[in-house]
Each structure stands twice: as C-alpha cells, then as structure tokens.
C-alpha cells in the first residue's frame, strides 16, 4: 500500500506500530527463536546451559541481557572443530539449498547454509522492506554488476527483486566498460554495488565519455562497505551518477537488516525481523538513543543459522523517533 508523498510500505501495520506493541511482537518472536536454537543447535544449547539461562526465562526486554553474546570467532572455532559447518546451525546440509561464506576480512571465512524457507521466503521478506523503502516498483530495471560466487552480496537482492517483478539484467562476467554499455543499452533505472566500485564505474564512465547523469539510472543501492551512510561518499556517488543513493546493510551471517527510506533520515533496522541493541563497548549496558554504542543483533525469523545477540562490531547511534516516512522502525 502507498502512503502520502510516494512512501511505499511492505507491511504497513508492523512498520508503523507504536514502540510498545512493536517490542511485544519482537519478544514473542524472540521466545520462539530461543526455543528453536535451544532444541536444534548444540552450540546454543551449550551456551545457554553455561550461562544458566533457559529460553522460558526471557519474559521481558530486560531479560534479554541475560542471554550470552555470540561472536564471529566462536562461529569460526566451531567450524574448525567440526568442519565444514560447525555445530551452530539449526539445520543439516541435506536441508540447505544455498551456501555462502563471509568475506574473510578478519580471518578464516565463516560458512553459512540456508534452507528453502530462509532463501525463498525470509530473504524475500527482508528485501521487500528494502525495495519499498527505496521506492522500487515493477517498472524498475535493475542492473547487477557482480560475479556469481560464494559472496552473498547481491544474490539475495537479485533473487528477491526478480520475484517482486522487477526486470533484472545480470552483469557478472563482464568488464567494467561492458557493464556500463549494458546499463545504457538496457535502460537500467537502478544499479547496486559497493560504494568503491560504484565510484570506480563513474570514473570509468568519464574516461569513456559517458554522461551517467543523462542515463536512465535514477537510484543507486550501495552496500558491503560504509559509504552510503558517510555523507561525503554519498554526495560523491549521487553527483557522479546523477541518481539518488540508498544505504543497504546486512551481513552473510545474520542476513539483511537495514535500509534507507526515501526520506534519507538514517538507515532503518527492520525491527519486525530483527532485535537490535546499542551497547556500551566496555560495560555492555544499553546506551541512550543518540549516543554511540556497539550494534548487537538477533535474527528473529531465520531458521537455518539464527544468531542470538550477535556482536556486529559496528558502532552506531540509534534514533527511535518516528521517521518522516511514518515508520516507527528505529534508524
């Protein structure tokens, strides 16, 4: 459904819930998720038993802080000790339909597998919030300038956008020059990429004498690096492409949790699917909104590799005031 001034919602009811009701919804999903991981993941059963906490002990948002954190190093260790998948997943390889691995920027890559429901339904749900946030519709033509591989970047986005009815132009296996020609030839209206590659494409276009600002490209979706949330980088992308740039946040391990809406007032966390905390990096106590904290996320709907209180190692500031788009999801 569409609201005033071109805002499109995917699930208007949940996206505009008063905070109290939203937190009640999150708590309900969290309790189910805790039972799921306790039952299916040896890693989490050990973790909870060591912390002397049971899924049923979590009755309020304050109780969430009794749950131990999950860190990337533990996932890595689990896979080293029980290769190739470790013992943190809630599914076996026979249930998986897609596999990915992390980029390995901070050590050995972590492997992730997704079952049918996570790949076809949960990812779709996550990305439909992004699609509506960016204001993309079936009229849009998406160019995906990335190679097919083990990195999750853009494959979930592409699959979800196809399912949503956008035309997708695959741009893998091409030189940057050929990609730019394809974008123009096929009249792409949306291009996705990492901020650094988008800027490199803009530079290549200049060398080729192509005026990107005069092309059909109207929206840019940037992810994989900080950039779309860095004002100077965003401005550079927008001025060089003559297009509106949107932030897209996610990770291989936890899925796709944040998107910028057409109001550009920060990056929304899809709180109907994730529980987000901003904690003091030293004391791990929640920091007040507007202050810098470490982002800790819990995936509330993933079945395959749900992560509970996962330390993202990113520093963020939360803003829980309603956005101009009327969403109550924090930014």
Image (spheres, grey):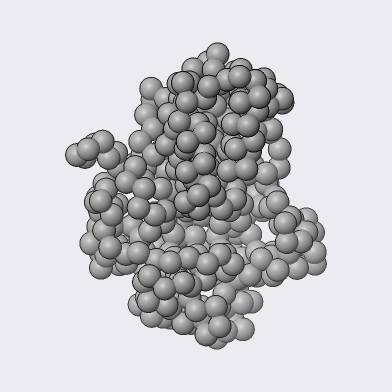
Asked if residue 17 lies left or right of residue 54, the reply is left
Number of numbered labels in the structure image: 0
At which x and y percent is residue 83?
79, 59
Q: Which quarter of the picture shows residue 86? A: bottom right
* Residue 28 occupies quadrant: bottom left
Residue situated furthest top in the rendering: 185
Q: Is residue 208 above or below residue 242?
A: above
Give x and y (percent) for residue 2. Answer: 24, 36
Residue 211 placement (x, y as % from top left): 53, 22
- Give me the residue at 50% from left, 49% from top: 232
- Residue in the image at 27% along x and 48% along y: 325
**Quarter of the figure that contains the N terminus:** top left
Q: Relative to 183, is 132 on the left or the right? A: left
Q: Is residue 166 visible?
A: no
Evaluate whether residue 23 shows in this view: yes
**Between 94 and 196, which is closer to the camera in this rendering?**
196
Q: Position of residue 8 (x, y in %)?
A: 29, 39
Q: Is residue 32 above or below residue 124?
A: below
């Amino acid at each position: 459904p569409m609201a005033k001034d071109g805002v499109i919602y995917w699930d208007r009811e949940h996206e505009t819930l008063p905070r109290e009701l939203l937190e009640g919804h999150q708590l309900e999903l969290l309790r189910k998720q805790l039972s799921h991981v306790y039952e299916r993941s040896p890693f989490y059963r050990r973790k909870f038993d060591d912390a002397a906490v049971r899924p049923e002990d979590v009755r309020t948002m304050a109780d969430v802080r009794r749950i131990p954190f999950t860190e990337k190093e533990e996932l890595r260790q689990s896979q080293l000790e029980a290769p190739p998948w470790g013992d943190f997943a809630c599914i076996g390889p026979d249930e998986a339909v897609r596999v990915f691995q992390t980029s390995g920027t901070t050590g050995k890559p972590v492997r992730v597998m997704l079952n049918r429901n996570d790949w076809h339904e949960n990812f779709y749900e996550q990305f439909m919030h992004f699609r509506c946030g960016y204001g993309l519709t079936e009229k849009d033509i998406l160019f995906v300038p990335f190679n097919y591989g083990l990195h999750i970047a853009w494959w979930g986005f592409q699959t979800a956008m196809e399912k949503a009815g956008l035309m997708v132009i695959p741009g893998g296996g091409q030189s940057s020059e050929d990609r730019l020609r394809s974008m123009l030839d096929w009249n792409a209206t949306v291009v996705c990429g990492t901020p650094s590659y988008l800027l490199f494409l803009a530079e290549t276009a200049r060398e080729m004498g192509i005026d990107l600002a005069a092309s059909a490209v109207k929206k840019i979706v940037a992810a994989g690096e900080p950039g779309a949330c860095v004002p100077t980088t965003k401005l550079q992308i927008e001025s060089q492409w003559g297009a509106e740039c949107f932030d897209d946040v996610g990770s291989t391990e936890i899925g796709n949790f944040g998107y910028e809406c057409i109001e550009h007032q920060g990056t929304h966390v899809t709180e109907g699917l994730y529980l987000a905390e901003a904690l003091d990096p030293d004391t791990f106590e929640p920091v007040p909104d507007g202050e810098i904290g470490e982002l800790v996320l819990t995936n509330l709907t993933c079945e395959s590799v749900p992560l509970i209180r996962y330390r993202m190692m990113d520093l963020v500031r939360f803003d829980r005031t309603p956005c101009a788009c009327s969403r109550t999801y924090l930014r």
